[in-house]
Amino acid sequence: KTGASNPSGFPTLCTLKFISRCYNAGCNVFGQPSKRESMVLRLKDAGDVALTAEMVAPTVLGKRCFIQWPHLQEGIICGVSDRQMTIRDQGKVAKHDSNQAGEWQNAVGRSANEYLSKRGIDVGALTVMLHVKACVGMVRQ
């Protein structure tokens, strides 16, 4: 079996919609930023709609997802945040003040930079961040 029919957690490019480009992105190679061009995967935009935490939260909170691409691990979405607010699993809404909005923007920037420099993936502009708890162990039912 290959592609999307692989067992869960098996790395594959069939799970993402992307375009590829070669450019000097400074990807980390053996502990040093690359000096030459690197193949960078650019995730395709979800669409023209600017997503907010209020739009995304009802459809994803409490659902299982896969994290840490390309070596996938299962997790549960426990929160959704954007620049204005954070919505937690129990429906608790916390509005952000200007300091928290700045911290959120810094966290988004760090996350996007980490994916670009360590994995060669350009995630583009992020407007919503999912907070996910990684699942540990397995229970068979």
Image: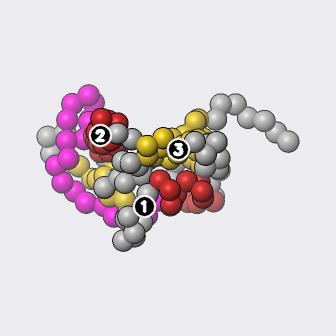
Q: Earlier in the sequence, mark 2 or mark 3?
A: 3
Indicate which disc, 1 or 2, sits on the residue closer to the N terminus. 1
Q: Is residue 3 visible?
A: yes
Instruction: Please tell me which residue is depicted at 73% across the width and 35% down the height of the picture.
Output: 138
37, above or below 59, in the image: above
- Was residue 84 drawn as part of the magenta stretch in this picture? no
Label 2 secondary element: helix
Q: Quadrant of residue 102?
A: top left
Residue toward you, 96 or 107? 96
Residue appearing at x 18%, y 54% in the figure: 23
Between circles 1 and 3, the one closer to the viewer is 3
Asked if disc 1 and disc 3 are in contact, CB closer than 8 Å, the reply is no
Q: Position of residue 34 (x, y in %)?
A: 19, 39
Q: Which mark is residue 93?
A: 3
Left or right of residue 8, residue 49 in this image: left
Residue bearing mark 2: 98
* 127 left or right, relative to 39: right
Say which mark, if any, is on residue 51: 1
Amino acid tagged 2? Ser
Identified at 65% across, 31% down, the residue is 136
Q: Is residue 1 left or right of residue 44?
A: right
Crowd around label 3: few <14 · some 14–19 · many ≥20 (10 Å): some
From the viewer's side, name the closer residue of 29 and 92.
92
